[in-house]
Amino acid sequence: MIAALIHSMVVCPDMEKTYPKISHGEGSYLYDESGKRYLDASSGSAAVSNIGHGNAAIADILKDQALKASVLPTHAFSASVVENYLEKLVRFAPKGFKRAWTVTSGTEAVENAIKIALQYQQMTGRDKKHKVVSRWFSYHGNSIFTLDVGGMRFRRKMYEQWMHNFPHISPAYQYRNGDGMSEEDYCDQCINEFLEVIQKNDPDTIAAYIAEPVVGAALGAVPPPKDYFKRIKEICEAYDILFISDEVMTGFGRLGTPFGIEKFDVIPDIIAAGKGISGGYFPLSAVLIHNRIASVFESQMTTFKAGHTFACNPMGAAVGNYVLDFIEARNILANVNEQGALLRERLNELKTLDIVGDIRGEGLLLGIELVSDKLTKEPFPANKDVSKRIFLNALERGVILYPGKGSADGINGDHILVCPPLSINKEEVEFLANTIRESIVLVQEELHQLIL
Ligand SMILES: Cc1ncc(COP(=O)(O)O)c(C=O)c1O
């Protein structure tokens, strides 16, 4: 019993439950030990397995690199595998990006991105600039620092004493916050709020702004109003605030562009990336910086003051290199646009169901918000576990979804994130869409019975 508990503690957060064990994966599918097959529409947890499961070529690459050198004494050496990868990574980034290096998790990438912004501000003589403006309902990582920068109230709760060091603005989530307004008016409202927060805090104290191009797991694939990011970027430039794009979920083709922010015609100053960067085959993440920032470090001959044991790891570089080749060779961006459009079309059909309030997202990062009343957008009470019910029902039918809660007020509000591997094909999309419909219809009936 104790061994089982420890085991479930290690593997899964929910200790009351025995999880089926996965034996292996292939392409878009995972197989449990009984042989049951699941279409992995959460791509690991979540939006990681962009290139699918069970890729034999990566297994060979990992083996080859492990035999050559698995880690470097980076205080004294570099390696071609790392340098070639970093150059390729920078070429994959938007125009003007100059430098990159890797760490091992999204949390580390975000924290490093912010530290670079802070160091840059100090190096350019703006010593007072130390605050980061972020958005409520966003997730930027699970260290105490990144939880504070992020805006997920229930995750922050336990660490309240260490929170509230940074200003937050609303999440640009029109479905919940801009009812009855035109998209333009709602965008104006969000932009004015940003300007007010800058003034209230004193522009000389604001170092950076950080956002997910499309809010991922925290809200269930919420893009901002058109032109929102362009206008935010203009304001950032006016006040010497660096724009950090948290691409941990949206990078590496997830939205149909190399990085998600490109979908909104913005070139950020710093990018934090993770998850799909390695497709899940190695713990890898990265920070990429624009020449505007890199040139200051170069001209002052100053290094970025950070160090992590597994930074610029050669195994990670070898895997990351393969992922970039895969994206190009398999035409992944085109596939995301094609299959994403098809999946979106099929999910849009769900809008006629009583409990489906909103369908949204970009590329293959799509979301479904569930409500008890479509007109008033009243959420289901949290204890009804609506998104979890749909998730469990779909699991029975062989599809893994990513359920989420709190989208209405931080506690109540159910959503489902749909983010299959980017190599998904048309037949799999059809199966996925049909299964989601069947599961929602069934849960809708169940809820109806509960109310009656
Ligand atoms: C947008 C975003 N930023 C940061 C993180 C943190 O990444 P990690 O879990 O790899 O530390 C996540 C993880 O879900 C994320 O979605």
Image (spheres, rainbow, N blue to C red):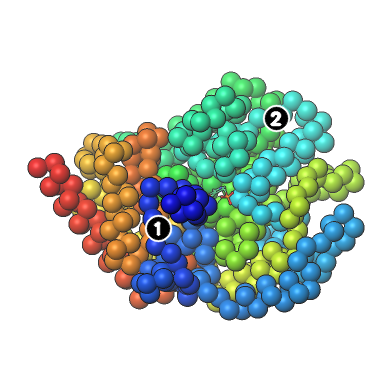
Residue type at tag 1? Tyr
Q: Residue at x 28, y 58 (%)?
A: 393
Percent x, y of residue 75: 87, 54
**Residue under circle 2?**
130
Q: Position of residue 250 (x, y in %)?
A: 53, 55
Of tags 2 and 1, the one toward the viewer is 1
How far is mark 2 from mark 1, CA to CA?
44 Å
- The local crowd at label 1, few if under 14, some if 14 to 19, many if 20 or more residues have their Cα within 10 Å, is few
The residue that appears at 57% across and 42% down in the rendered structure is 142
Residue shown at the point (79%, 73%) measured from the top left: 68
Image quadrant assignment for residue 326:
bottom right
Look at the numbered disc 2 and give the secondary structure of its residue: loop
Q: 246 and 50: which one is in front?
A: 50
**Decide: marks 2, 1 in contact (CB < 8 A)?**
no
Q: Quadrant of the C terminus?
A: top left
Residue 76 seen from this side: yes
First along the sequence among labels 2 and 1: 1
Does residue 157 sit above or below 60 in this rendering?
A: above
| 273 or 145, nearer to the observer | 145
Of the pair 323 and 143, the residue shown nearer to us: 143
> Tag 1's secondary structure?
loop
Check the image and name the residue furthest to the front.
1
Residue 185 in view in this figure: no
- Residue 148 lies, with reference to residue 289, above or below; the image says above
> How many numbered markers are drawn?
2
Residue occupying the far left of the picture: 452
Q: Identify which amino acid the numbered label 2 is placed on.
A: His
Tell me, for residue 19, which label it has, or none. Answer: 1
Question: Closest to the observer: 273 or 243?
Answer: 273
